[in-house]
Image: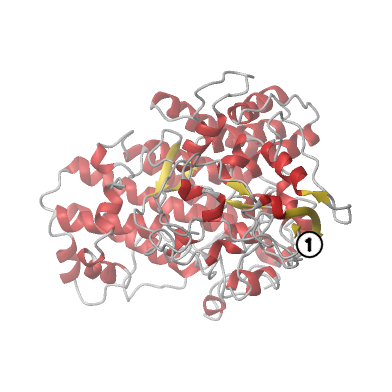
Amino acid sequence: MKKIIYFISAIIGATGLYSCQKEFLEKPETTGNTTIETVFASSVEATKALANAYRTSLCQGLFDNGGTNIGNGTLSGISGEAMPGESWADIYAAYSLAGLTSERSTDNFANNFVAIRRNYIISENIDKVPDMDGTTKGYVKAEMAGLNAYRYMGMFIRYGGVPVVNKTFISSDDLAIPRATLQATLDNIIQLSDAAYAGLPDSWPDKSVGRLTKGAALAIKARALQYAARPLFNSAAPYLSLGANNNMICFGNVSQQRWTDAVTANEAVIAWGKSHATDIINSGGGANIPNPNALDDYGTATSTPNNKEVLLAYKLDNNANNVKMFKFYIPVRGSSGRGGSDINNERYLTDNAGMITNFLRIYYKADGTDQDWPKVGDAARPYADYNTRMQQMEPRFKADNYAHGIDAWNNPGNSVWSYDNINSGVNISGSGKGDAQSTKFYYKAGTRSWFEWPLFRMSEFYLNLAEAYNELGNTTKALQNLNIVHNRAGLPSITESNPSALRLLIQREWSIEFYKENRRYFDVKHWKRSDIASGVIGGQYEEFRFTFAPGKSNPAITSDILSYTNNNTLSPYWNAKMYLEPIPLSEINKRILVQNPGY
């Protein structure tokens, strides 16, 4: 299958083309302007540096691209969505059982500032390129502002207030920059986002698809303001005291204006999208009408490269054997069968990352009601009960998962995605295989092993509005925006009018809609969920186990599966300090930065 090569992947795929620029851009300039002059001597060389800036900025939080400092796993495994994978892996042993240490974070703290410095170097020197026109130079400066806003947004969500850097430094500069307040960090994100919006185009030619647009700048601003309005930061007192530095981790007051600001920002994203052919994909339903094409529309939105719902994606086009990030998501062993290696020669990385019952219960049935799954201690049910109930599940579940003994719904009729080819077994006495396993990002992918990580999808901004309007007491607008997402999923409209109950339904929608997209880990903490230690991030996890006929053990032969039960399995660690992440001890030991409380 021929891969679609976009602007970014076309350049970053040949690392040798920009290795010298990368080395220069990652270290302070101490030897004069020679290397700067080399990098910015022509538009060809400058464009290589630009592409590298995209790759190393947008990888934040993504595995094996310098974007995370947790080894061998995904955020799904520490978010209450799925089991964490292999027991020897960092994410299982170091995090699930003990929590993040001061040298572990979900974004690699130091790399944030490597990327930010690189982007400022480009912005400050792009005018030196002799064969680049002024309009293009202006775009590049706006892109660098946008990429830095994206990085600061991610740090804001993870750490609270962080050092604000607004230029490159040389060896004679004072590098002792302390953490800024939460408000100053947010102000910096807004300033950078506004600068990016002012200078970016609304769209790019086909050869440059993947670069930031005005819509992406609006999206960064909207997400930052949404997190600013949520209870973790929008509070009079922090989750744990940081003494005189409390203003680094909370605003010090509760303000409804923050929700109003979030509404304004999210409405701006949607308005821009509607004017530029970018919106939630719903090809079959209307207002308050369940979408009959929900499986295809949601699957397309999460999986198809360059679809109209995605505002910005991490466009790294490569195969699963070369980019480890993909190996944590694709369940297929090989297009030539389970022994094949052409798709994923490290398939074991997904084997023990099955969905937990705690999360399975969040999904709706296709008719919008709750499914009746067994509780721990209930009598065993026949396998036919499991099969029937799985077939009744809503389209988003079927787009994102396969069930034990059932061919994947996401690639119908494709033998590559048959249960026999993708299954990793079931729990008999152990744990990890889960109640189902993920197929997220591979709807109708066939033998394509790569995907483009959706950094912003338009459904986010409708759910942001539902959440914000509900907190402002406007139930009508909250339901209107919630049901745009809920109806697209093929489900009948939600009519709940109690704000507290509606809040939980909105959070439920977030969890389903953005399963596996690195959102739940941060959302449940910023919502300050009261059950966060009760099987959400910490607390008791549950999984199904299966029994077989005597002498049988192959789940692909469903007639051999006798029954299933729900059982307690892993019980991950939770401590209130985990609401925000630790700054690395190596940085704290420099006696400039203040550590987050509890670490």
Q: In this picture, is 345 found above or below 268?
A: below
**Res 408 → quadrant:** top right
Percent across and percent down for residue 61 are 50, 59
Mark 1, residue position: 539
* Left or right placement of residue 480 versus residue 130 in this view: right
Count residues near mark 1 (Cα–Cα under 10 Å), then give few for <14, some for 14-19, many for 20+: some
Residue in the image at 47% along x and 51% along y: 188
**Res 119 → quadrant:** bottom left
Percent across and percent down for residue 225 are 57, 43
Quadrant into which the C terminus falls: bottom right
Residue in the image at 63% along x and 40% along y: 258
Observer-nearest residue: 479 or 493?
Answer: 493
Q: How many marks?
A: 1
Residue type beneath disc 1? Gly
Percent across and percent down for residue 215 are 41, 36
Instruction: Identify the residue at the far front of this view.
Output: 551
Classify mark 1: helix, strand or loop: loop
